[in-house]
Amino acid sequence: MTNDDGVESPGLHALAFALSRVGEVTVCAPEAEESAVGHSITTRIPLRLKQVSLEGLERTYCVNGTPADSVKIAIGWLMTEGPPDLVVSGINLGPNTATNVIYSGTISAATEACIMGVPSFAISLGTFVNPLWPTAADIAAQVAETVLERGLPSRVLLNVNVPNLRPEQVRGIRLTRQGDSSFVDALEERLDPRGQPYYWLAGSYQMTDTDPTTDALAVQDGWVSITPLSLDLTAHHVFSELSRWSWGDERREREPRR
Ligand code: MN
């Protein structure tokens, strides 16, 4: 297990508690919050691994690095008995739907596991306030059992988003596609005490894609959204169109480069 909200996050603790019913849990997570770091890895400073205590768990570690670092060090170094059967990343505070998938540290941790050949999923809760962790934790255990039983296709991971509802209010599980909505950035300029400008990235999420088959809409409508994500980012659907384009070869033959 890992996350991007840091080893002290209540979402991680709720997940650990739920997954302890499914199997033997090892936690390796960033020591501080690493939200929105995407798939960054640490290559220019040393990584430090520290054992921490988490109630009811024997193997809990934190790293002064990113979510992807945590997975690399856990599978590549910590787990000398061999790779885990499953890597679960979360529970993230806040949804990881639509364009957020690109920025998400939570998903990147699951992606790293997938790259290393371990079945994985990311799980996020669709709220930033008053999180109902037990709902998402139970869904995580349910999805974990299914993935352990069936495995996942090679180079595919799951992105799970749970609505912030009580369990009995959740309508069910829907397989979705990644939507197109995104944050509309607002950059604020302020002055520091020395009169020099600095910039603070803000913005708000704009639901521009209202297709009901998307992740964000499913969560908004009270469904658990499961989106299969592929390591292959190739836009296969434009291949035939782009293969008909002229890419300049004939121009180059006409006027050879000097
Ligand atoms: Mn986060």
Image (cartoon, rainbow, N blue to C red):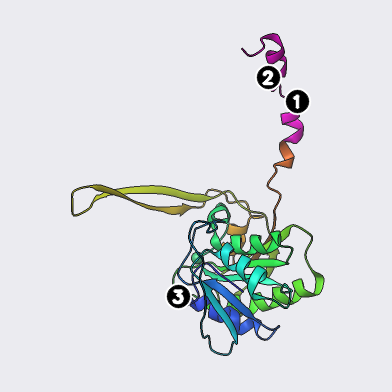
Residue assigned mark 2? 248
Q: Amino acid at mark 3?
A: Asn
Q: Which residue is mark 1?
A: 244
Magenta stretch contains residue 2: no
Which of 129/116 is in front? 116
- What amino acid does circle 1 point to? Arg
How far apart are the two marked residues, 1 and 3, measured between alpha carbons?
A: 52 Å
Question: Badge 3, how many Cα within 10 Å: few under 14, some, many 20+?
Answer: few
Q: Say if 164 sits above or below 109 in the image.
A: below
Measured along the vertical axis of the image, is residue 165 above or below residue 180?
Answer: below
Q: Is residue 154 left or right of residue 38?
A: right
Q: Nearer the viewer, mark 1 or mark 3?
A: 1
Q: Residue at x 74, y 63 (%)?
A: 117
Q: Is 46 in front, or is 187?
A: 46
* Image height of 161 relative to 138, above or below: above
Looking at the rendering, the stretch of residues picked out in magenta corresponds to 239-258
Question: Helix, strand or loop at disc 1?
Answer: loop
